[in-house]
Image (spheres, rainbow, N blue to C red):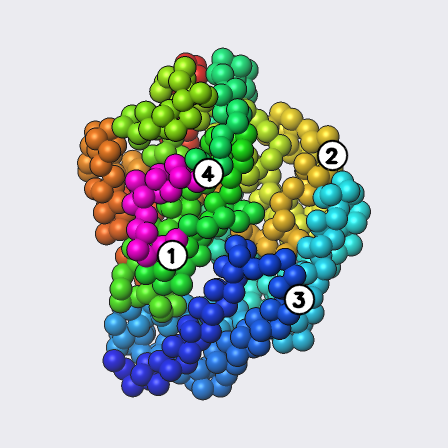
């Protein structure tokens, strides 16, 4: 190990421990902590966060990063060390670029703004949120400008925080392709959506039975209960402390069979990524998924490509029917498969089906791009939102609560994040095209054998952590960089068959 890297280790270890503590509090807050705990626990979290900042952002670490970047250029570091220095440099730059007083003011603003958003959504009154939203946008523009390279737009800076390989240029091409191919397909499909009956899905499904079946599904896919747990929360999520402690949550709705099942498959996809990070990388800065987009590719691969296929359900559908015989005894496997793939344009992104989903993302992307290019007035955003829903999905929200106020992300200042969801679906399709070339996926699924698929992803994607970026991984696995054609072809093929177009 290089001498400079050895000197850096105590800083890395301490910041990792503090980060782990912070994550545990986050987990606790979302799952078990009583409602009023935050009033006082926030003080503890504040102190831990300050210590984390001090441990990482200081002159000693700055000097060591500079030295180690030189050593990396001279090829004096191992791949693992290079990966860690790259992540450290990124984190350092992000944290250091913002003056502490502005950072504090912004954090106060986001908590006020998030509360205003919740009230605005509840009362269906965009104007309650708009003044805070304007301030949030100003801060984000300023923060992005601190880090922008010459000629780089603020929105590009934000996008690259989530997916370093794809900027505005690449995303414009990606989303244009989807608009051209998927908008007309969705219009055709929605004319025939009445041909698929899905009423069975909205009968009463006992929550305890749902929990049991979801646990079974997660284990069936490969979740290791010696290295992970499942809890309940308002919104499903995955959180990892290291590769031996990966936690997922789920949400159960009594009159919706699908919701919890596909959420758990989705989160299990995220969890497998984190559980399969190589032991040599876990508990380091490089010991996590390489990007938001790649992470979403793993969850969406299992949720949509595997989890909504007939082959996946063939060996286990009887078990589902046996769990709820009164609701499902007359629903055949073919009927169920059509039901879980039914597509209908809807207003709410989180409930959208696989086909209409990317259009929800395009709308947010186009609006964010306009906001950061100063092309739209914040007061005019609800109108713009509604116009785009009409244009791409053929429906118009009747109120802002179901329109522009539906997602919480903007109230926290999270911009540039939405595209990762669509990027994830596209990467999943690209990987799938390769996987079916190298193994008989359908046959394996029909036998109930998911091990070869899991091992393929572990050995080609998961174990590398952040030591390879999205395009490097894709190039090594599929022989080409990100290519949206696979996604468009996958959707067209699947939905033309399903709806006999
Ligand atoms: Zn996800």
Tell me, yes or no, if residue 244 can be seen here.
Answer: yes
Is 130 a magenta residue? no
Q: Which residues are magenta?
A: 211-229
**Camera-nearest label, 2 or 4:** 4
Neighbor class of circle 2 (other Cα within 10 Å; few <14, some 14-19, many 20+) is some
* Alpha-carbon span between mark 1 and mark 3: 27 Å
> Hey, which quadrant is residue 472 in on the image?
bottom left
Q: Which residue is mark 1?
A: 246
Is 212 a magenta residue? yes
**Camera-nearest label, 2 or 3:** 3
Residue 424 or 372: which is nearer the viewer? Answer: 424
* Alpha-carbon span between mark 2 and mark 4: 35 Å
Q: Earlier in the sequence, mark 2 or mark 3?
A: 3
Q: Earlier in the sequence, mark 4 or mark 3?
A: 3
Percent x, y of residue 192:
51, 14
Percent x, y of residue 304:
40, 34
* Alpha-carbon span between mark 2 and mark 3: 33 Å
Residue 241 or 443: which is nearer the viewer? Answer: 241
Residue that appears at 50% across and 71% down: 93
Badge number at residue 399: 2
Q: Which residue is mark 4?
A: 208
Q: Reply above or below: 75 against 320.
A: below
């Amino acid at each position: 190990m290089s001498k400079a890297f050895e000197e850096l280790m105590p800083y890395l270890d301490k910041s990792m421990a503090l980060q782990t503590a912070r994550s545990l509090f986050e987990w606790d807050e979302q799952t078990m902590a009583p409602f009023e705990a935050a009033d006082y626990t926030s003080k503890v979290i504040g102190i831990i966060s300050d210590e984390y900042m001090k441990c990482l952002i200081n002159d000693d670490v700055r000097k060591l990063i500079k030295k180690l970047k030189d050593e990396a250029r001279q090829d004096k570091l191992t791949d693992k060390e290079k990966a860690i220095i790259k992540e450290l440099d990124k984190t350092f730059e992000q944290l250091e670029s913002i003056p502490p007083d502005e950072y504090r003011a912004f954090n106060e603003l986001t908590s006020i703004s998030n509360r205003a958003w919740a009230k605005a959504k509840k009362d269906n009154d965009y104007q309650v949120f708009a003044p805070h939203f304007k301030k949030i946008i100003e801060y984000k523009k300023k923060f992005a400008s601190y880090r922008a390279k010459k000629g780089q737009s603020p929105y590009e800076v934000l996008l690259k925080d989530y997916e370093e390989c794809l900027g505005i240029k690449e995303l414009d091409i990606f989303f244009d392709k989807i608009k051209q191919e998927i908008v007309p397909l969705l219009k055709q499909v929605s004319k025939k959506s009445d041909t698929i009956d899905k009423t069975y899905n909205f009968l009463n499904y006992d929550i305890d039975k749902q929990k049991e079946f979801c646990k079974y599904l997660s284990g069936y896919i490969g979740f290791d209960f010696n290295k992970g747990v499942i809890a309940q929360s308002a919104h499903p999520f995955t959180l990892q402390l290291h590769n031996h402690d990966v936690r997922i949550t789920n949400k159960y709705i009594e009159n919706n069979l699908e919701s919890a099942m596909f959420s758990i498959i989705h989160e299990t996809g995220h969890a497998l990524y984190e559980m399969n990070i190589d032991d040599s990388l876990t508990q380091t800065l490089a010991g996590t998924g390489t990007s938001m987009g790649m992470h979403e590719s793993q969850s969406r691969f299992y949720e949509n490509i595997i989890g909504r296929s007939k082959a996946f359900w063939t060996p286990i559908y009887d078990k589902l029917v046996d769990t709820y015989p009164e609701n499902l005894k007359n629903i055949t496997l073919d009927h169920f498969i059509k039901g879980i793939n039914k597509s209908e344009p809807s207003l709410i992104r989180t409930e959208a089906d696989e086909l209409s989903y990317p259009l929800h993302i395009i709308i947010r992307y186009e609006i964010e791009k306009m906001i950061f290019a100063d092309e739209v007035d914040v007061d005019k955003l609800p109108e713009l939102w509604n116009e785009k829903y009409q244009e791409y999905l053929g429906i118009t929200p009747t109120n802002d609560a179901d329109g522009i106020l539906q997602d919480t992300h903007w109230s926290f200042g999270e911009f540039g994040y939405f595209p990762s969801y669509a990027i994830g679906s596209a990467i999943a399709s690209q990987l799938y095209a390769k996987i079916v070339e190298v193994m008989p996926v359908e046959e394996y699924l029909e036998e109930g054998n998911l091990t070869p698929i899991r091992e393929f992803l572990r050995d080609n994607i998961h174990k590398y952590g952040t030591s390879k970026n999205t395009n490097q991984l894709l190039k090594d696995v599929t022989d080409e960089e990100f290519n949206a054609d696979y996604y468009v072809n996958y959707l067209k093929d699947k939905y033309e068959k399903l709806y006999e177009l």
